[in-house]
Image: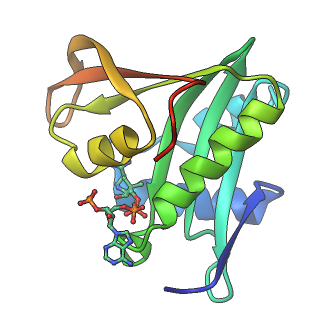
Amino acid sequence: MPQYWIDRLSDEADLEGVLEVEAESFTNPWTRAMYSWELQNRSVCHIFVVRTEECRVAGFCAFWLVFDEVHINNVAMRPRFRAQGIGTALLRHVLAEARQLGARRATLEVRASNERARRLYERLGFYVAGVRRNYYTDPVEDALILWRDDHEVAG
Ligand SMILES: CC(C)(COP(=O)(O)OP(=O)(O)OC[C@H]1O[C@@H](n2cnc3c(N)ncnc32)[C@H](O)[C@@H]1OP(=O)(O)O)[C@@H](O)C(=O)NCCC(=O)NCCS
């Protein structure tokens, strides 16, 4: 496994890296304009990046902190860095940081067919709380709404 560390997104080069990871990971990636909008609200919008010696942004997680709730908007690793435990470590880090900032619950949406992501979230104590029918496009698919309460053990 490569040596890696987790940082807050800090500059334009980091944002460039996030956009690349988006493009490598999603059929409907978030655009620069969407992130620029997010980044105007730094008290609510938080972005953490995973770095390695050879890769400035190997993965990232973007979330909102709204009162005591974490809303995880996006999480992705570049394909070559997947299946090495780093995505799990990134989410654990994000949940711990958010807790320090006062979060007590976390939520996110996931494609029903995204089994790898669903297993990851289950490992961290998320549970299915609802379904949004046909929420996603490209392809059209249901979103599962997951929640995690602070007392859940991150096993
Ligand atoms: C979902 C995602 C972020 C997970 O990141 P990741 O770094 O691959 O996650 P992990 O490596 O921690 O866990 C993934 C799997 O690798 C396994 N793994 C962890 N370390 C491993 C190792 N050293 N060797 C082999 N497998 C390993 C984990 O057990 C896990 O297995 P499972 O899928 O059977 O549960 C990543 O797959 C991704 O970017 N997907 C595309 C974007 C996406 O779908 N994002 C989620 C949107 S809601």
For the residue pair 24 and 116, the one nearer the viewer reads as: 116
Give the camera-side residue of 99 and 51: 99
Placement of 90 over or under 99, stated as above or below? below
| Residue 115 horizontal side relative to residue 53, left or right | left
Which x, y percent locates residue 147?
44, 21
In the image, taking residue 108 as reference, residue 8 lies left or right, namely: right
Where residue 83 appears, as percent x and y from the top left, is 34, 70
| Residue occupying the point 44% across, 67% down | 85
From where the camera sits, is residue 25 visible? yes
Q: Nearer the viewer, residue 144 or 140?
A: 144
Front-most of 121 and 59?
121
Total number of numbered discs in the rendering: 0
User: Is 60 on the left-hand or right-hand side of 81?
Assistant: right
- Tell me the residue at 54%/32% (across/down): 72
Q: Give above or below for 56 relative to 120.
A: below
x 67%, y 73%: residue: 51
Q: Quadrant of residue 23?
A: bottom left
Where ligand 1 lies, by image quadrant?
A: bottom left
Residue 39 position, x and y percent, is: 76, 35
Q: Residue at x 68, y 87 (%)?
A: 53
Q: How was this image coloured?
A: rainbow
- Determine whether 69 is above or below 33 in the image: above
Res 27 seen here = no
